[in-house]
Amino acid sequence: MSSAAEDTNGDRSGTTGTEGVRLFHDLLDGRTLASEYAKRGSVLTVLGRLDEARIEYGRALEIDPRHRDALNGLAHVLTALGEDASAVDLLRRDADAAAAKADPVTLNNLGNALLSQGDLPAAIASYRQAIAVEPRYAMPHRNLALALYTLG
């Protein structure tokens, strides 16, 4: 007699056969797998292992080229590695896609990368665009204030 948590293969991991099939299908369509790579990239970034994080974000983007967390994470890593131009290019591509979806996080991150690159007017414009999309999102307000303070 099998327990309720046992699937047809005798696995007692707690995942039912139906849940397992759903997880398998999620992996097949890439959503879950790309997100897992992006999460690994995020953890590696926090640990300061930027070269490894870059690889994980790249794997996520190979599966889903528009994966927002992977795009933003990779741009953050590129900026931290001093590859500001690459980060700006990546975020501009994402911002173009985000414009239709109005993603304030991407627009804020683009502002950060532009500021790091020394393009203060473009950074200010990006922060303002993020604020216009989501006025309650605090980060672009903070970053805009710092950029305007820098401007004088």
Image: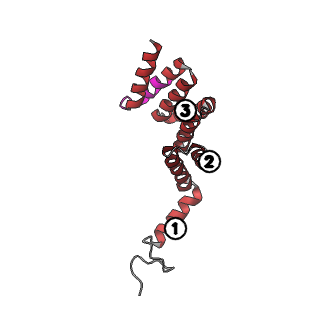
| Mark 2 or 1, nearer chain start | 1
Up/down of 73 relative to 84, above or below: below
| Mark 3 or 1, nearer chain start | 1
Q: Nearer the viewer, mark 2 or mark 1?
A: 2
Q: CA distance from mark 3 to mark 1?
A: 35 Å
On whether residue 69 falls in the magenta region, the answer is: no
For the stretch drawn in magenta, what is the main secondary structure? helix
Q: Residues within 10 Å of mark 1 (few under 14, many from 20)?
A: few
Residue underneath mark 2: 55
Q: Position of residue 127 (x, y in %)?
A: 46, 25
Q: Position of residue 92 (x, y in %)?
A: 58, 31
Element carrying mark 2:
helix
Q: Residue furthest left?
A: 136
Which amino acid type is marked by label 3? Answer: Ala
Q: Which mark identifies residue 13? A: none
Q: Which mark identifies residue 21? A: 1
Residue underneath mark 3: 95
**At 58% from the left edge and 46% from the top edge, which residue is drawn?**
57
**At 46% from the left edge and 35% from the top edge, which residue is drawn?**
105
* Residue range (magenta): 126-136
Which amino acid type is marked by label 1? Answer: Val
On whether residue 135 falls in the magenta region, the answer is: yes
Q: Position of residue 48 (x, y in %)?
A: 52, 43
**At 55% from the left edge and 52% from the top edge, which residue is drawn?**
37
Asked if the residue under mark 3 is in contact with the one under mark 2, i.e. CB atoms within 8 Å, the reply is no
